Amino acid sequence: MPSIIFLDLSHNNLYGEIPNCNGNASSYEMLKFLSMSYNNLNGSIPQWIGNLPTLFSLHLNDNVFQGEMPFLKNCSKLITLDLGENYLTGSVPSWIGEKLLSLKILRLHSNKFHGSIPMELSKLKKLQILDLAQNFFSGLIPKSFKFLNSMAIQNKRLEPLIPDDYIIFSYQRPDFSISLKLFNLPDILLPDSISIDYKGIVREFKGILSLVNIIDLSCNKLTGEVPIELLSLVGLMSLNLSRNQLTGEIPKKIGVMQSLESLDLSRNHFLGEIPKSIVMLSALNYLNLSYNQLFGRIPTGTQLDTFQESSYYGNPKLCGKPLHKTCESDEHKIHDEGGNSQDDDDFSLFLGVGLGFVVGLWSVLGTLLLKRTWATTYFQFLDKMINNFYVFVNMKLNQWFNQ
């Protein structure tokens, strides 16, 4: 049987176990791409898959595989490893970070892995997508993640995920040999794609995988604080740490991660104020900080002004827009402005009365000064009124004393 280079059996109704090769694996020695995803295959992943030295892409996701992760040490050229949506158990072996140094995509989403996240994963300098979500990982987020060099690169160029030298087909026999570059294969033969939670929605990435930098550690049992070293991954586009047991404050300098388009820290135990530097994340268009213990004023400016209340639900001590709860300092300001407004109104009233009195008085006096006959008549009338009042008072006093 001739050597198989690409084998895609995905999206079928296959069921049962993958058969063992029983030592007859020579037909698969040149296998470069293997996908059996989206079937109903069960049992353990056979060991012969771990003895494929030219394999660069392995997709066994969305099946019912059980047992521990297969021994893939010999797959040193592996670039994509997707074992997501299965029932695999045990811990993630440290040899992944020691032997699979070409790995760019590691997806173990929705399995039953447990234990701590091995620090050896930090040796994967080319890693661009790390998806360990929906497992039972515990312990701290490794500080050594700062050495994931590819995630620290901003403004990457679009290029093939698979290097040219990985898609060279070589065949040798005693009488002849041949070497061909497989550039003209139809796209269906290179269906490398990854489905991952991005901006709160499961999206399929295909064709632009070389541009994507994502870490998803959500839905585990991780504890401790977010390591400050994680901020060095300035090329990271999506960071999802939601649904863990993380504590402490959100790193104050999170604004340096200016490539972030999606940030989900929801359903943890974060406390303190939302860092003001978060307004520097100008590319951010998905934010979820809900159900923590955050307090204080929500920062405003740039992209933050576009987020809805749902981004902050479950933090009863947060205040300010877009929440309906106003901050205490804002209430004092409104009260002070109201008091100042009342003072201004009282001053305006007194000023108006005073001006009216002055104008009225001078209208009368001015008329009397200009019209002498009016002035004589006015003062005669005033004198008469005073005399009458004087007489009236004297009469009343005499009557009172004579009683």
Image (spheres, rainbow, N blue to C red):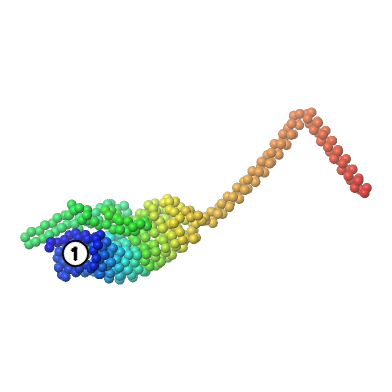
- Say which quadrant the N terminus sits in: bottom left
Q: Position of residue 2 (x, y in %)?
A: 13, 61
In which quadrant of the rendered view does residue 274 lie?
A: bottom left
Instruction: Looking at this view, name the residue that lies furthest to the right.
Output: 402
**Do we see residue 68 in this rendering?**
no
Q: Is residue 24 above or below residue 234?
A: below
In the image, what residue occupies the spot 36% across and 59% down? Answer: 239
Q: Position of residue 132 (x, y in %)?
A: 32, 64
Q: Is residue 284 above or below residue 291?
A: above
In the image, what residue occupies the spot 72% across and 34% down? Answer: 363
Q: Position of residue 246 (x, y in %)?
A: 41, 65
Between residues 42 and 83, which one lies in front from this camera angle?
42
Between residues 228 and 84, which one lies in front from this camera angle?
84
Instruction: Looking at this view, name the residue that lies furthest to the left.
Output: 175
Label 1, residues with CA under 10 Å away: few <14, some 14-19, many ≥20: some
Q: Is residue 245 left or right of residue 377?
A: left
Q: Is residue 57 left or right of residue 375?
A: left
In which quadrant of the rendered view does residue 391 lie?
A: top right
In the image, what residue occupies the spot 16% across and 61% down? Answer: 4
In the image, what residue occupies the spot 83% across and 33% down? Answer: 380
Instruction: Looking at this view, name the residue that lies furthest to the front.
Output: 13
Between residues 220 and 118, which one lies in front from this camera angle?
220
Q: Is residue 199 left or right of residue 326?
A: left
Kind of residue sitting beneath label 1: Pro
**Do we see residue 17 in this rendering?**
yes
Q: Secondary structure at mark 1?
A: loop
- In the picture of the structure, the residue carrying the numbered disc 1 is 53
Q: Position of residue 257 (x, y in %)?
A: 37, 56
Between residues 245 and 390, which one lies in front from this camera angle?
245
